[in-house]
Image: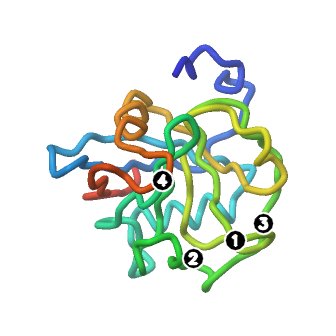
Amino acid sequence: FGVSSNSFLDMSGPTVHSTVYFDISIDGADPERITFELFDETPKTSENFRQLCTGEAGFGYEGSKFHRIIPGFMAQGGDFTKGDGTGGKSIYGNKFKDENFTYTHDVPGLLSMANAGPDTNGSQFFLTFIPCDWLDGKHVVFGRVSDNIELLEKLEAVGTKSGKPKKSVKIVSSGQL
């Protein structure tokens, strides 16, 4: 993916709110860890994701699946209530407002909030495989992959044009480092 060479990842970029992880299993295989840095510049969105990773609100990502993976675009997950892209909830209630659009979808490996229109953030998120400038100003970018970006290639490989993954992609555990 070549993210490490991008200027977006240099030290003058976002400050880190927290570092979290997913242990992801593809088709029941041994899980692999992917680590994310969440941005200080999106404190409400980052805190929502952090708590959904730790489960401290009594619910969260552990045990949920990536329900939509489109090669050449992104992998979407976070619907831990219905599992099909129609559910999920935030630590603030069902939905919360777009915090800001400080960061753009300019490189692979970004974490961004999935939504159903303005101010409808819940728990669903996506990871970019490519720059996605058409999403700028519509989805809040709040983090980035900080370790094992290579796992995104494995996720992309089980995606389809329709978005329905060819194999199960499960977050078997998640937390904060």
Q: Nearer the viewer, mark 1 or mark 4?
A: 4
| Callout 4: SS | loop
Task: Check disc 2 and report the residue beneath it.
Answer: 90
Closer to the chain start, of discs 1 and 3, is: 3
Task: Check disc 3 and report the residue beneath it.
Answer: 98
| Pointers 1 and 3 in contact (C-beta within 8 Å) | no
User: What's the CA distance linking mark 1 and mark 2?
Assistant: 14 Å
| Callout 2: SS | loop
> What amino acid does circle 2 point to?
Ser
Residue 88: x %, y % from top left: 51, 77
Task: Check disc 1 and report the residue beneath it.
Answer: 116
> What amino acid does circle 4 point to?
Gly
Closer to the chain start, of discs 1 and 2, is: 2
- The local crowd at label 1, few if under 14, some if 14 to 19, many if 20 or more residues have their Cα within 10 Å, is few
| Pointers 1 and 2 in contact (C-beta within 8 Å) | no
Closer to the chain start, of discs 1 and 4, is: 1
